[in-house]
Image (cartoon, rainbow, N blue to C red):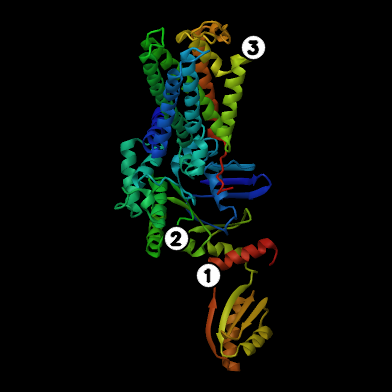
């Protein structure tokens, strides 16, 4: 569906994306990275807004900057907020849908359906200026979905949505994926992406650090330390015992919270060691928490690998 | 959907939703400026050294240029400023539709302003018997000139708008002054590269303007050299120029990267 061959994009001397090569099959992808990591540049390269300085981009088999007919297959919801405030949401979505070459009558039907899908039916004939941030966000989503694209690209789509709106949006996006359509969901908030269950692309500093499912990525980093937080009645004793028993990369004590935070590459040994400590040394353990299943840890560790810290 | 329907989409959108109190007020001021100036000149005894049609031409020319500067030049810039560019340019027909749709909307606005303005000027001039020619003939002469002028200048300003992401209006104003107020008056080959040269030649014939003619008739004619150029060729050059400018603008807007301040 999308192919990048050694793509680099420079804004004068600033690197937007740096030597990215990938081949994405149809499916759902979470594009993760901190602010300024190159997510929007990556998206703009896919939609042909930007030309790569070096390398080639191919979307649905064609170069997007050369053949804009592929934009009919793509629905883009940018992070930017437009200022069409005198229009109603319906007028705005109809106009943008018509720019895909869809006639007025069909565009009205599609716009109405899309606005209904994002829960804006009741308010679609009000001026955009009277909308809340969440309603404007829904309108932006509607304009991206209205023409029934094959690939939906959403840049920070959860911004401004209230908790109920986030749940509804997550459900809608899951439904979108379940219908066999493709999705690229860019966000710097991990749990938003995790909730939609995509494979993910992790980007930072313009470089693609990893791609695949969380499990696949974790296989790439078996040597990375996993972080555990252990709450105990005797943190100091526990720390000493753990240091004797396994290799630990980092240990932090917080006597006030009665917690020990350790980073170890021997995660599999840790649970056995803790069992022994509880049985033999009579140290009480109240809680063990690990973030090993969270994308947050993958993200943090991959960034560390990228920076040469691991 | 055809190219024309795509263009109509944005033109309709601009003409319907681009109307604001501010735009109506500006249009009103521009429309009334030439007849007001003409009225003041006539009340004070009429032009001393100039043909009255030349006075109308100069004011309407300036007003038309200003209208096109305001509405044709910021075609891309206005979308970038309103952050609408990313939304329209991610549509398969978005870029071309924006260029031609905004061009149509701008020239329709400018054309209406100039035409109303000229009509009022002619009525004022005729009410005090300032014209030797029938005003119906003059009106059709102005209609032709205004139509050709807004088409040509609109295309130039649209081209400047897609070429220069920032300060396009300043560049367009500098072009208008440099090319059409200065170069067009040079009695040499270079003047033939300006739009005004051809409009000037047509104006001399259709409106029977004489630069040096006055009520006293004692000032020699100057700047009448474009009248030598054949009318039909002048019209073809202006239409050809318009098409060439729009084609160049279409090429540029289709392949150019435009980055908003937020994205940069």
Q: Nearer the viewer, mark 1 or mark 3?
A: 3
Q: Nearer the viewer, mark 3 or mark 2?
A: 3
Q: Is residue A215 visible?
A: yes
The outermost residue toward the right is A308
Query: Which quadrant holds residue A105?
Result: top left
Tell me the chain of label 1.
A
Q: Which residue is mark 1?
A: A293
Q: Residue at x 46, y 14 (%)?
A: B53
Q: Residue at x 68, y 62 (%)?
A: A307
Q: Secondary structure at mark 3?
A: loop
Q: CA distance from mark 3 to mark 2?
A: 70 Å
Q: Residue at x 64, y 12 (%)?
A: B189
Q: Secondary structure at mark 2?
A: helix
Dot 1 or dot 2: first in sequence order is 2
Circles 1, 2 touching at the beta carbon (< 8 Å): no
Q: Residues within 10 Å of mark 3 (few under 14, many from 20)?
A: few
**Residue B182 placed where, x, y %?**
61, 20
> Where does the C terminus of chain A fall, quadrant-wise?
bottom right
Q: CA distance from mark 1 to mark 3?
A: 79 Å
Tell me the chain of label 2.
A
Along the viewing direction, whichever of A32 and B183 lies nearer the viewer: B183
Along the viewing direction, whichever of B62 and B51 lies nearer the viewer: B51
Q: Which residue is mark 2?
A: A196
Q: CA distance from mark 1 to mark 2?
A: 15 Å
Q: Looking at the image, is B106 positioned above or below residue B122?
A: below
**Residue B179 placed where, x, y %?**
60, 22
Q: Which residue is mark 3?
A: B188
Circles 1, 3 touching at the beta carbon (< 8 Å): no
Q: Looking at the image, is A259 positioned above or below residue B118?
A: below
């Amino acid at each position: 569906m999308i192919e990048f061959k050694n793509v680099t994009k420079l804004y004068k001397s600033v690197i937007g994306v740096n030597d990215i090569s990938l081949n994405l099959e149809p499916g759902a992808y979470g594009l993760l990275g901190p602010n300024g990591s190159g997510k929007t540049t990556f998206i703009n390269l896919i939609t042909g807004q930007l030309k790569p300085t070096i390398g080639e981009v191919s979307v649905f088999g064609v170069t997007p900057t050369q053949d804009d007919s592929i934009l009919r297959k793509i629905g883009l919801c940018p992070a930017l907020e437009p200022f069409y405030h005198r229009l109603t949401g319906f007028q705005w979505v109809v106009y943008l849908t018509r720019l895909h070459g869809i006639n007025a009558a069909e565009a009205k039907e599609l716009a109405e359906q899309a606005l209904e899908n994002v829960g804006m039916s009741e308010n679609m004939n009000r001026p955009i200026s009277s909308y809340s941030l969440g309603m404007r966000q829904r309108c932006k989503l509607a304009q991206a979905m209205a023409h029934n694209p094959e690939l939906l690209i959403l840049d920070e789509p959860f911004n401004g949505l209230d908790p109920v709106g986030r749940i509804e949006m997550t459900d809608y996006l899951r439904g979108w994926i379940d219908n066999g359509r493709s999705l690229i969901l860019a966000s710097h908030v991990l749990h938003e992406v995790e909730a939609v269950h995509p494979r993910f692309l992790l980007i930072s500093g313009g470089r693609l650090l990893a791609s695949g499912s969380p499990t696949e990525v974790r296989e790439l980093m078996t040597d990375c330390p996993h972080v555990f937080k252990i709450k105990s009645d005797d943190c100091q004793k526990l720390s000493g015992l753990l240091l004797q028993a396994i290799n630990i990369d980092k240990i932090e004590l917080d006597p006030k919270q009665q917690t020990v935070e350790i980073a170890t590459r021997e995660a599999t040994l840790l649970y056995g060691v803790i069992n022994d400590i509880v049985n033999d040394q009579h140290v009480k353990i109240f809680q063990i928490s690990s973030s090993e299943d969270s994308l947050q840890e993958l993200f943090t560790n991959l960034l560390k690998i990228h920076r040469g810290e691991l | 959907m055809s190219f024309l329907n795509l263009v109509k989409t944005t033109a309709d959108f601009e003409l319907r939703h681009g109307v604001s109190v501010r735009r109506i007020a500006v249009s009103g001021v521009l429309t009334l400026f030439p007849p007001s100036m003409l009225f003041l000149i006539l009340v004070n005894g009429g032009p001393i050294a100039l043909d009255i049609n030349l006075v109308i031409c100069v004011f309407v020319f300036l007003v038309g240029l200003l209208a096109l500067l305001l509405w044709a030049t910021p075609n891309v810039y206005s979308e970038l400023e309103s952050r609408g560019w990313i939304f329209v340019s991610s549509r398969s027909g978005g870029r071309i539709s924006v260029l031609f749709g905004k061009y149509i909307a701008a020239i329709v606005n400018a054309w209406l302003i100039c035409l109303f303005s000229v009509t009022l000027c002619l009525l004022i001039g005729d009410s005090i018997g300032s014209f030797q020619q029938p005003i119906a003939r003059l009106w059709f002469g102005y209609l032709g000139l205004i139509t050709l002028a807004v088409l040509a200048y609109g295309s130039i300003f649209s081209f400047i708008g897609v070429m220069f992401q920032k300060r396009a209006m300043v560049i367009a104003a500098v072009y208008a002054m440099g090319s059409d107020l200065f170069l067009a008056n040079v009695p040499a080959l270079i003047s033939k590269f300006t739009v005004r040269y051809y409009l000037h030649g047509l104006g001399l014939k259709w409106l029977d303007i004489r630069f040096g003619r006055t009520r006293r008739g004692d000032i020699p004619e100057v700047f009448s050299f474009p009248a030598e150029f054949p009318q039909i060729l002048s019209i073809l050059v202006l239409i050809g120029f318009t098409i060439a400018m729009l084609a160049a603008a279409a090429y540029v807007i289709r392949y150019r990267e435009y980055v908003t301040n937020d994205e940069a």
